[in-house]
Amino acid sequence: MKVASYEIIAGNETVTTHKEFGFVYKLDVNKVFFNSSLGYERMRLASITKPGEMILIPFSCVGPFVILLAAKGAKVLAVEKNLEACRWLVENIRLNKVEDNVTLVRGEAFRLHNTLNMAFDRAIIPTPYGCDQILDIVYELMKFSAPVHFYTFKKHSQIEELLKKFERKGFFVQFYRKCGNVAPCVKRWAFDLIKCNKPLRT
């Protein structure tokens, strides 16, 4: 995910603390990506997460999805390849006292199927731009009927074909909505998908 550029006009650093739903996230905005506009989505998913669920979160960054779900009692495997983001995620896990419920893997999300031998109850994928192929990797790691919450960037004209593509991959589309503007005509979309036993169509 591309990091924005900032000009310091007061003080001498770009480290900040974001507060959301009673949790705190420290980060350096010049070195890691953070999107506060997904706060509603994070709380929505926390409201349907059950204690004890095994949850996979690739592209976890500094942990806004990770920490909220871990605080609900889920067992979260967070995957992030950026070293700076991992450092802040470790700090945020400590600050929010969810150490017992989070396992952090510093690595490439696209290699997960080669390194993990387990099946997850739920996955949350805050997908970076242009990385939709991660859905194929995550599919192989999910239990039958497990929900996958997939976030991606699309034009409205692309959605109808995308829904058909999800079906071909073996997902049932339970819900979808727009959840943010990114560029002219391009929006972030949230999809709640359910893994089916086999692709619905060939």
Image (tube, rainbow, N blue to C red):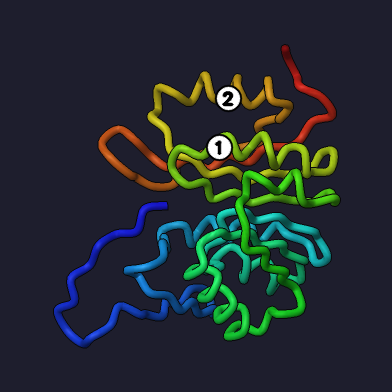
Residue 197, given in percent of the width and then of the height, sits at 84, 29
Q: Image point 68% across, 44% down: which residue? A: 148
Q: Indicate whether 92 appears above or below 58.
A: below
- Which residue position holds label 1? 176
Q: Image point 62% across, 57% down: which residue? A: 107
Residue 59, given in percent of the width and then of the height, sits at 56, 55
* Secondary element at tag 2: helix
Using a 10 Å C-alpha cutoff, classify the residue at mark 1 as few (fewer than 14 neighbours), some (14 to 19) or many (20 or more): some
Quadrant in the rendering for residue 34: bottom left
Residue 31, given in percent of the width and then of the height, sits at 37, 68
Query: What residue type is disc 2 on?
Result: Leu
- Which residue position holds label 2? 163
Q: Quadrant of the C terminus?
A: top right
Asked if the residues shown at circle 1 and circle 2 are in contact, with their CB atoms under 8 angstroms apart, the answer is yes
Q: Indicate whether 130 appears above or below 13.
A: above
Which dot, 1 or 2, sits closer to the camera? 2
Judged left or right of residue 91, residue 193 is right
Q: Image point 53% across, 43% down: which residue? A: 190
Query: What residue type is disc 1 on?
Result: Tyr
